[in-house]
Image (cartoon, helix red, strand yellow):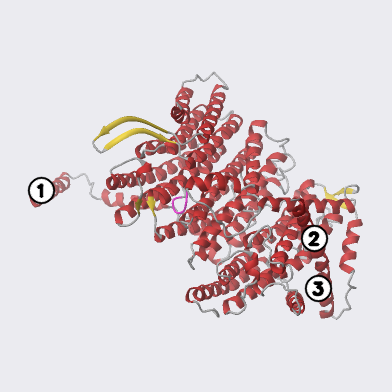
Amino acid sequence: MSENLLLVPVFLPIAVGVLVFFIPKMVKGVREALSLLTAAIAFVVVFLIFRMEESHLFISIIEIGDFNLHLDLLSAPLASFILLFATGFGLLISLFSASYMAGKERYKEYYGYFLFALGGTAGVFLANHFLLFLIFWEMVTASLYFLITTGEPRAREGATKSFAMIGASDACLLMGVGILWFLNRTFVISDINLPAEGWLPVLAFLLLMVGSITKAGAVPMHTWIPTASEGAPASVMAYLPAALDKLLGIYLLVMISTKIFVLGYSLGLVLMIIGAVTIIAAVMFAMVQHELPKLLSYHAVSQVGYMVLGIGTLTPIGIVGGLFHMLNNSIYKSCLFLCGGSVEKKSGSNELGDLGGLSRSMPITFITALIAALAISGIPPLNGFASKWLVYQGVLETGKGGSFIFLIAAMFGSALTLASFIKVIYSVFLGQKSKYTEKVTGDSGFAMVFPVVVLAILCLFFGIFYRFPVEQFIAPGVGVSLTPMGIWESPLATILLIAGIALGLIIYWIGRAMRSVRTADTFVGGEKIEAETIRVEGTYFYDTIKELPLMEKFYLSEEKGHFDLYILFGKLRAWITGALQFLHNGILSTYLSWSLLGIIVLLCLSIFLL
Amino acid sequence: MFLDAGKYIFYFLVFPGFIFTLAVGLISVWIDRKVTARVQWRVGPPPGQPLYDILKLLGKETIVPKNSNKTLFLSAPLVGLGSVTIVSVILWLASVYKISFVGDLFVVVYLLMLPSLSLMIGGMASGNPMAATGANREMKLILAYELPFLLCLAIVIIKSGISINMVDLAGNHVMGSISGVLAFLISLLCIQAKLGFTPFDIAEAETEIMEGPYIEYSGVPLALFKITQAMLLFTLPVYLISVFLGGLNFRGLGILWTVLKYVAILVVIIVIKNTNPRLRIDQALKFFWRFLTPAGIVALVLAIIGHISGIDWL
């Protein structure tokens, strides 16, 4: 009985997703209610699965010799723990969407694809058969494409790009799975364990790695996320690129680097280099962005670097840190995207230059965004710090001299992250009001505020009690025990910080500040200028850095797309088709001579082989 | 359990936490003002002056600007105060009593960023354009000095035989090597910037943007910032002593030696402060990224070579 429970989180959302398409246009509110209910049921069922013993469901479908396809579902501890988060995000974001997507043109299809993505994700985490895994994986890719298109018309470009890039990486994944089958003659994931030595296993690893880091969005396969953010609904960005795609991609990366393959140092080094480059490059791009979703999406890329770096260290603490960072990142990143969506819905703009001064009219959104922003910048005692701290130790434990480069890249990346979130917090919530934000009165409604509040509380909880998830679930899930070399007593530090704040309050009380507080005009050098009219826009905060000689070239080539594999491949394709066009000149004799040449080659080959 | 709690409260509030750090910090501020005065051929204030200044500020009314986020504006100074107190306790306990408390080197480095963060957030919350400019400069300054600062941090970790425990680091002999000396000198300049002293007082820049983030602060919140600054003036040199100069030691002649180390660092900082003009923010970025970062990389490479080949003096 209990193993049949595994079917619910996978097939219930898919079934309801199909059903949603058939609900007539006139009926209102049912789609939202259905999707919320489905996500809630999935969440509860996954919680039950998570609490159960490891269970296994096996239904045979096709079997032809060595080649087979079975419905083979397994609830491994780590997978079901991550799935718990995935369905949790599904629940929160479907609540958010109920308010956010209302009034948008294509909100009808939205819930269908939303549920497909949820079912597909559950399928990936539970599948113990590589073909099944691929089917569900593709389902998430396809729903991502459709979900992005439900945004503004300009989102189509991003949708196509995402589909092309992830689709290409999925082809790599397929080839990798093919090689694995060739080597092991089995598709059962839990049966495969081979050392990554010799060219074929290494090739298989690299192919699977490309699949996983494209889904998660690491350099150089990251460019679909920023493009998709232009015009895609904020809830979609929070749901897939910020949360589910990270969970899927990094989960696959952990699986291939710990369970499926036994890695050597050199492949680990490849991952560490990808991680470090991702951290720095993406955050440098993020700093100079002018559009809130695009800035956030570059951070969604940059944070992947920490996860890949941690996993690439191949030390227990690094891998656990990477996984913990994956969870933390999906928490604060979806919180930030949702806050961005809230702001956009209220003010009607997501250009940083158009916003400002929202902290007083949207206090709850502001506080949650501030917590999430500090968490992503790794400010103790929030969750981002705890996982980064584990990753840093992982890097140190590799014991190689060169790994200090990665340590410095990771720590400096964290300062750069803080810098770009100082810009966000200032330009969106503090500073002067603009013509867009003047009219905003009052915070968003319950449906849009509740999810971000939950996520912000999770940021605090996972930061202060980081030992709980790490030691109870993640480390046993990976099958390691942790011996941190450093010390971080987060609860004590939090108590002391609170004590420090209390101390400051006592000083306030001694100074009787609470009794005589006077409100005065802003001081602008003693001039009689209305301070409200002087707007210092956060948009230009880091132009000093942008204009440094070397940086200028770096940013210029980014703008030209020199770092974008999608554009580079596009140019390559144009070049190749250009060359082929030359052959298609419409003259019959040319075609005939090519055909003749082909027949001769075939004949020669057959004579040789026979 | 209760004994532990009592012990922590004592650590935090009295010694070596808030009261002790503040007392030494205020003396350091006095030394700063006195030396500055002597450099400028003035007499300088009496030893109690920094304390009187803070007491005076506590008695003044608090003015809050009209279009500020009032809660954030008033609560921002508190975070910096809390974090600098924790850092002080961590450093002192590790260095003097060999007790590991709360966190390791990474924690210390991150907590040391909080005072700057609270200043930036407070300034931005005030809604003043000058404060926003100052906060933005402060952030760029952090980016500037953080890169060489982290390179030096890596050297310290290497020299301790890959340890991040503050107790191990305090007993560490970094200065016996070329890379160690380089790292110390670079860190000293980074500390100058962390303190916001000339030539890196770019964020405050009285003559350009009128104290930047501080512009709207008055009365008690300003006093809180002044207290945090005074405590930092003690904590940051102690950080340098802990990780580079073999830590603090109060047995026998060690007292003299420790005090000498502290005063020497303080005087160097003050002399640099008084003999240099303020840099522009882009000049500061270039200074840290073009000069100190390559120097830090050279030192790091030397340290790694020394670590691998076992040559201590590299």
Chain to which mark 1 belongs: A
Label 1 Cα crowd, 10 Å radius (few <14 / some 14-19 / many 20+) = few
Chain to which mark 3 belongs: B
In the rendered structure, find residue B18 and report the number of the disc placed on it.
2
State the CA–CA distance, disc 1 to disc 2.
88 Å
- Judge from the rendering whether residue A293 lies leftward or rightward of residue B127; answer left or right: left
Residue A411: x, y in percent? 58, 60
Residue A442, picture quadrant = top right
Question: Is residue B126 at least partly visible in the picture?
Answer: no
In the rendered structure, find residue A606 and report the number of the disc placed on it.
1
Chain to which mark 2 belongs: B
Residue occupied by mark 3:
B32
- Residue under disc 3 on the same chain as residue under disc 2: yes
Give the structural element (helix, strand or loop) at label 2.
helix
Residue at x 47%, y 24% (from the top left corner): A21
State the CA–CA distance, disc 3 to disc 2.
20 Å
Give the structural element (helix, strand or loop) at label 3.
helix
Q: Is residue B239 above or below residue B120?
A: below
Disc 1 vs disc 3: which is toward the camera? 3
The stretch drawn in magenta includes residue A83? no
Stretch of the chain drawn in magenta: A217-221
- Judge from the rendering whether residue A119 lies leftward or rightward of residue B47; answer left or right: left
Amino acid tagged 1: Ser
Question: Is residue A555 at least partly visible in the picture?
Answer: yes
